[in-house]
Amino acid sequence: MSGKPENRKETAGHRNRNAAILCVAVVGGMVGMAYAAVPLYQLFCQVTGYGGTTQRVEQYSDTILDQTITVRFDANTNGVPWEFQPKQREVTLRLGETKQISYVSRNLSNVPTSGTATFNVSPARAGAYFNKVECFCFTEQELQPGQSYDMPVVFFVDPEIVNVPELKNLKTITLSYTFFPLEKKAPVAAAPKTNTNQNENLGG
């Protein structure tokens, strides 16, 4: 009968085993997520950027308000020998209005170099309302020695931003890009060969 003490002990033991299995699975999942953190973070950044969660869209806003906002542009490099800057430091536009601006980069070295850019929007809360229609971020850029290259950004600020209490009176948004070097992976054939008989030669 199910009411017997031994059966109750059996049921409790079964629950304990299930709980133990669940704990092992959770710990294993956490370890797996730790190893996957870097590629997952890279994927997150490709969609959202490091800070503000900007949106990538393929259509323009069908609403334009009279309220204006100023977007400032910032440019940085980290380890890539380029001169990189926006062609204009800021632009004022109406909410919902589409604008195109450009950044320009120039390779200052005497060899071809490659880079890729990440972006950030501040304040971070405003990033969800900053829509990029066209952008050069996360695309490999290779410049020859002394070569200059124009990189356009087409964007608009979603009029819905006025419905967010903390952002409805926001006057300025900053869009920042940083270029990092993009290292080429060496071909497998070019990888140094290991001497499989090294231990035998040393042994005797």
Image (spheres, helix red, strand yellow):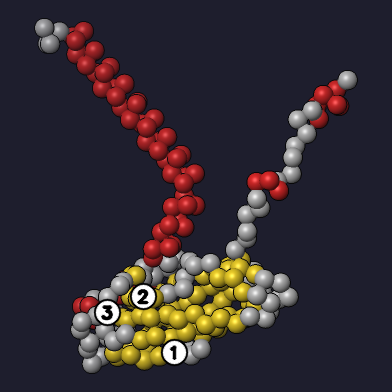
**Residue 5 horizontal/vertical position (percent):** 18, 9
Regarding mark 3 in the picture, which secondary structure is present there? Answer: loop
Regarding mark 2 in the picture, which secondary structure is present there? Answer: strand
Residue visible at 56% across and 76% down in the picture: 76
Q: CA distance from mark 1 to mark 2?
A: 16 Å
**Residue 83 horizontal/vertical position (percent):** 62, 81
Q: Earlier in the sequence, mark 3 or mark 1?
A: 3
Task: Say what amino acid the circle numbered 2 marks.
Answer: Lys
Q: CA distance from mark 2 to mark 3?
A: 10 Å
Task: Say what amino acid the circle numbered 3 marks.
Answer: Tyr
Residue hosting label 2? 132
Viewer-side label of 1, 2: 2
Q: Earlier in the sequence, mark 1 or mark 2?
A: 1
**Quick check: 188 left or right of 9?**
right
Q: Which mark is residue 90?
A: 1
Q: Is residue 190 above or below residue 193?
A: below
Residue hosting label 3? 60
